[in-house]
Image: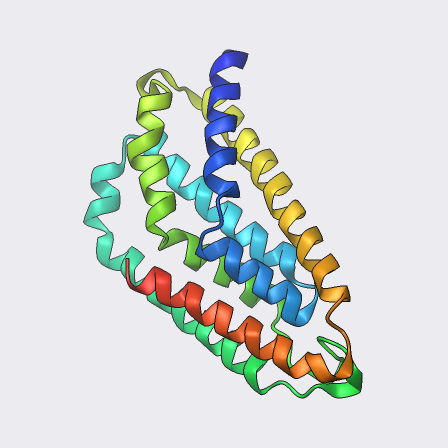
């Protein structure tokens, strides 16, 4: 693919990804409530889901995506349920030692966080619309070969890495100002409500 087409795609993806959606909100809530540990796994899961939707778009598999709608719907609800479980854990986490994400507080495994990011993104209508509706108007997908697809994958990985890294860094900095003992429980519960709201947004669309 020519550089101009890749640049246009990258810019469009950046604008779409940077706009706070349920995935970004859940990621921020996770970092503020539990720290940056595991955030990379959640972000990687979201990136993998983006690559799946990109594959559907480039492969002209929108019809197949619609055919397996029930499968994606199931993945979506599993992700929603897991986010609600994480929110419940945050809500009930003890404010040990006046620090957020204390060692004694429950923390999800990287594998489960990766799945949470993947399932939430697979069921996110915003992501579906971008790849299956908007992308064909940006790039002539019929002319994309294997090399072009790999180039697009590289752009997706790079753009999402930048977007997620910035949000993780900002959330981690905000978290440092919220470590006073009297605020820990309130912050944990605020993060839990935020994550529940992200799950509710996906469920309602």
> Against 205, is 53 above or below?
above
Residue at 70% from the left image edge and 86% from the top image edge: 95
Q: Quadrant of the C terminus?
A: bottom left
Give me the residue at 37% from left, 52% from top: 124
Q: In the displayed structure, does residue 129 sit left or right of residue 66?
A: right
Residue drawn at point x = 50 percent, y = 20 percent: 6
In percent of width and height, residue 135 lies at: 36, 29
Residue 159 versus residue 170: which sits nearer the camera? 170
Q: Quadrant of residue 30?
A: bottom right
Drawn side of residue 62 relative to residue 103, left or right: left
Q: Position of residue 126 (x, y in %)?
A: 36, 46
Q: Position of residue 46 (x, y in %)?
A: 50, 51
**Residue 34 visible:** yes
The total number of labels drawn is: 0
Relative to 135, 159 lies left or right: right
Which is nearer the eye, 27 or 70?
27
**Residue at (46% x, 25% y) in the render:** 9
* Colouring style: rainbow
In terms of image quadrants, where is residue 198? bottom left
Frontmost residue, 158 versus 143 = 158
Give above or below for 113 relative to 188.
Answer: above
Q: Position of residue 164 (x, y in %)?
A: 61, 47
Residue 75 visible in the current orientation: no
**Which sits in the foreground, 146 or 125?**
125
């Amino acid at each position: 693919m020519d550089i101009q087409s890749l640049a246009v795609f990258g810019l469009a993806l950046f604008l779409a990804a940077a706009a706070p959606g349920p995935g970004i909100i859940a990621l921020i809530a996770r970092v503020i409530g539990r720290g940056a540990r595991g955030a990379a796994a959640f972000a990687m899961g979201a990136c993998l889901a983006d690559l799946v939707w990109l594959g559907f778009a480039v492969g002209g598999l929108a019809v197949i995506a619609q055919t397996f709608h029930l499968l994606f719907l199931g993945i979506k609800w599993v992700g929603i349920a897991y986010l609600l479980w994480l929110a419940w854990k945050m809500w009930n986490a003890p404010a040990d030692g006046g620090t957020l994400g204390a060692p004694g507080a429950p923390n999800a495994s990287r594998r489960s966080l990766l799945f949470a990011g993947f399932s939430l993104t697979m069921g996110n209508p915003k992501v579906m619309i971008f790849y299956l509706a908007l992308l064909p108007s940006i790039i002539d997908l019929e002319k994309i070969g294997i090399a072009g697809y790999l180039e697009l994958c590289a752009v997706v990985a790079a753009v999402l890495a930048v977007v997620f890294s910035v949000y993780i860094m900002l959330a981690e900095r905000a978290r440092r100002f919220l470590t006073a003992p009297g605020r820990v429980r309130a912050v944990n519960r605020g993060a839990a409500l935020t994550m529940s709201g992200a799950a509710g947004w996906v469920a309602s669309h």
